[in-house]
Image: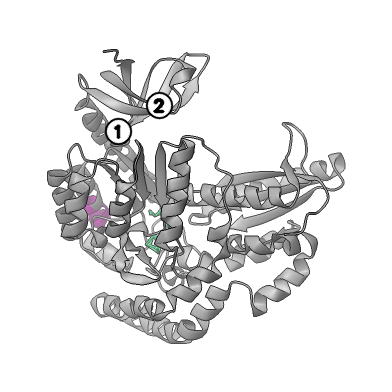
């Protein structure tokens, strides 16, 4: 990349770990172009919003920031604002009216051009940028858009069973893609991130998603799944742990569907096994798996693994089978329960969180009650409860009506949140009296408290000192607080 004049930048990230990881790559790409992080309370030359658009609320937050731009421009005439991340085409158009430019996070290798001549970049993007998208769309989209209209017809006939079969052709088409080519094309992976946290590092292993859950924007904003070669992942992790990090978080939209682009027989569990073999004391977490990827081989391995966390975020999305079908989640509530009970039985001290959506198109009171009852039964330690919001361009936006009133969505959200307080508390209660190994990831000097996580990802605080940051220590659990534990440093 060519160096350009010394300028300052700032990045505001809204979203999940994947967005945070994108920001780490963006920071590194900007710094390689001569940009430096803006000083506190100064207006940068470049402000980048890196946002997810999985829910409308994230997009609204960007809109909420736009009012400040006029005063920023007055303070710094060179001020420019940009947007990247998972942005839907409809939002892109609107945002372009107020932002100086918008770019695809996968195009970081073209950042010099993007910063200098965004118009040229946009023109390029039509023809050759997002090569994977072009490849994917050229070969699949015509086919897929036909399928999509049959989806619509079927939907109107309310023939969901048949439609979910049809939909698997989405994935077949996607998998027919030449993964090798696409992973090479994704230069995004080649940029070494500026890791934000010294002790806990985000390592993306795939990009995009082939599942096309009907409510979800991700396959449209990030494109079809691209897997990163195992060699690169193993090298990055090896390097990281030799430099000090104690926790590695593998990321992917459906992280468990990862397979090596050069050897399709080398799948997610094989990668975990090789990571586990790396020498040194460290923990590995992965986010977020898909329930149907949990076969015996993976569960057997997780049951014995020492470095892989005994915690999972396992999204259920709904506890009602009709809604699950309508969402094109390809499992039933029963299948989810089966996988979960196998994990609970086999993996020592297993703990989990889930994602669940309330008020999806047409969700009746009875269907919500199914979600409520299943939630109670599975009793997660934590849950990300979302009120459904229509994402333009998704299958749900095209064929279903967002018919549940906001008031009802809020009530259902509140009901599940109340239930979560109970399930979280009863999960935390089990730990009281135990002495557990924890990894210290933060220190609050005012309170002289360390914040840490257990291997099964329960949050804990205890009196300690700054020197414990990034260390594994033993803590005796004394009581529960809301969504966390309180303990005492154990000295032997
Ligand atoms: N509305 C509400 N929640 C959504 N999610 C994804 N798309 C939507 C949507 N349109 C939630 C899912 C997913 C999490 C990342 O965000 O629960 O697991
Ligand atoms: Fe979205 Fe479904 Fe892919 Fe998750 S699996 S990113 S919810 S399409």
Farthest residue in the left direction? 345
**Which residue is painted at 48% across and 56% down in the image?**
54
Q: Is residue 460 above or below residue 297?
A: above
Mark 2 residue element:
loop
Residue 484 falls in image quadrant: top left
- Report how many numbered discs are placed on residues in the image: 2
Q: Quadrant of the N terminus?
A: bottom right
Q: Is residue 376 above or below residue 53?
A: above
Residue 310 falls in image quadrant: top left
User: 225 or 164: which is nearer to us?
Assistant: 225
Disc 2: which residue: 471
Q: Quadrant of the C terminus?
A: top left
Q: Is residue 352 left or right of residue 174?
A: left
Mark 1 residue element:
helix
Q: Is residue 211 left or right of residue 389?
A: left
Q: Main secondary structure of the magenta part?
A: helix
Question: Few, some or many C-alpha atoms within 10 Å of disc 2 (few <14, some 14-19, many ≥20)?
Answer: some
Residue 217 visible in image:
no
Disc 1: which residue: 421
- As for residue 364 lying within the magenta part, the answer is yes
Q: Residue 257's spot in the image, x, y percent?
A: 33, 63
Q: Residue 7's spot in the image, x, y percent?
A: 80, 46
Q: Residue 311's spot in the image, x, y percent?
A: 28, 42
Magenta-colored span? 362-370
Tag 2–tag 1 contact (CB < 8 Å): no
User: 267 or 408: which is nearer to us?
Assistant: 267
**Which residue is painted at 70% across and 60% down in the image?**
111
Residue 482 visible in image:
yes
Label 2 to label 1, Cα distance in Å? 30 Å
Q: Residue 170's spot in the image, x, y percent?
A: 37, 78
């Amino acid at each position: 990349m060519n160096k350009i004049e010394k300028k300052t930048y700032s990045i505001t990230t809204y979203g999940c770990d994947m967005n945070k990881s994108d920001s780490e790559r963006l920071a590194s790409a900007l710094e390689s172009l001569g940009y430096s992080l803006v000083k506190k309370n100064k207006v940068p030359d470049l402000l980048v919003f890196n946002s997810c658009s999985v829910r409308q609320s994230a997009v609204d937050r960007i809109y909420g920031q736009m009012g400040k731009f006029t005063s920023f421009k007055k303070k710094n005439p060179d001020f420019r604002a940009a947007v990247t991340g998972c942005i839907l085409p409809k939002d892109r158009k609107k945002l372009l009216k107020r932002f100086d430019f918008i770019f695809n996070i996968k195009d970081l290798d073209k950042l010099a051009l993007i910063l200098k001549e965004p118009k040229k970049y946009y023109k390029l993007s039509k023809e050759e940028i997002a090569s994977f998208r072009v490849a994917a769309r050229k070969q699949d989209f015509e086919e897929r858009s036909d399928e999509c209209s049959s989806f619509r017809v079927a939907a109107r006939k309310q023939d969901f069973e048949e439609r979910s079969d049809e939909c698997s052709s989405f994935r077949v088409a996607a998998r027919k893609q030449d993964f090798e080519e696409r992973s090479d094309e994704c230069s995004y992976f080649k940029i070494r991130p500026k890791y934000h946290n010294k002790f806990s590092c985000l390592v993306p292993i795939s990009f995009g998603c082939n599942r096309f859950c009907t409510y979800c924007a991700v396959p449209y904003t990030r494109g079809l799944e691209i897997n990163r070669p195992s060699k690169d992942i193993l090298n990055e992790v090896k390097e990281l742990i030799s430099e000090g990090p104690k926790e590695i978080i593998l990321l992917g939209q459906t992280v468990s569907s990862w397979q090596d682009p050069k050897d399709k027989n080398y799948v997610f569990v094989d990668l975990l096994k090789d990571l586990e073999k790396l020498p040194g004391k460290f923990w590995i977490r992965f986010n977020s798996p898909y329930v149907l990827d949990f076969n015996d081989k993976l569960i057997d391995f997780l049951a014995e693994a020492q470095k892989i966390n005994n915690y999972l975020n396992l999204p259920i999305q709904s506890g009602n089978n009709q809604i699950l079908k309508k969402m094109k989640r390809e499992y039933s509530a029963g299948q989810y329960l089966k996988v979960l009970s196998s994990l609970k039985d086999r993996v020592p001290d297993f703990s989990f969180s889930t994602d669940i959506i309330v008020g999806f198109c047409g969700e009746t009171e009875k269907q919500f009650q199914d979600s409520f009852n299943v939630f109670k039964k599975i009793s997660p330690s934590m849950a990300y409860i979302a009120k459904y919001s229509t994402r333009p361009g998704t299958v749900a936006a095209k064929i279903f009506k967002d018919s549940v009133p906001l008031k009802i969505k809020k009530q259902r959200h509140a009901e599940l949140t109340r239930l979560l307080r109970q399930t979280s508390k009863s999960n935390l209660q089990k730990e009281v009296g135990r002495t557990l190994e924890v990894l210290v990831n933060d220190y609050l000097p005012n309170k002289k408290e360390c914040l840490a996580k257990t291997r099964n990802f329960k949050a804990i605080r205890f009196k300690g000192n700054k020197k414990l940051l990034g260390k594994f220590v033993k803590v005796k659990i004394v009581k529960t607080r809301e969504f966390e534990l309180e303990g005492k440093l154990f000295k032997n």
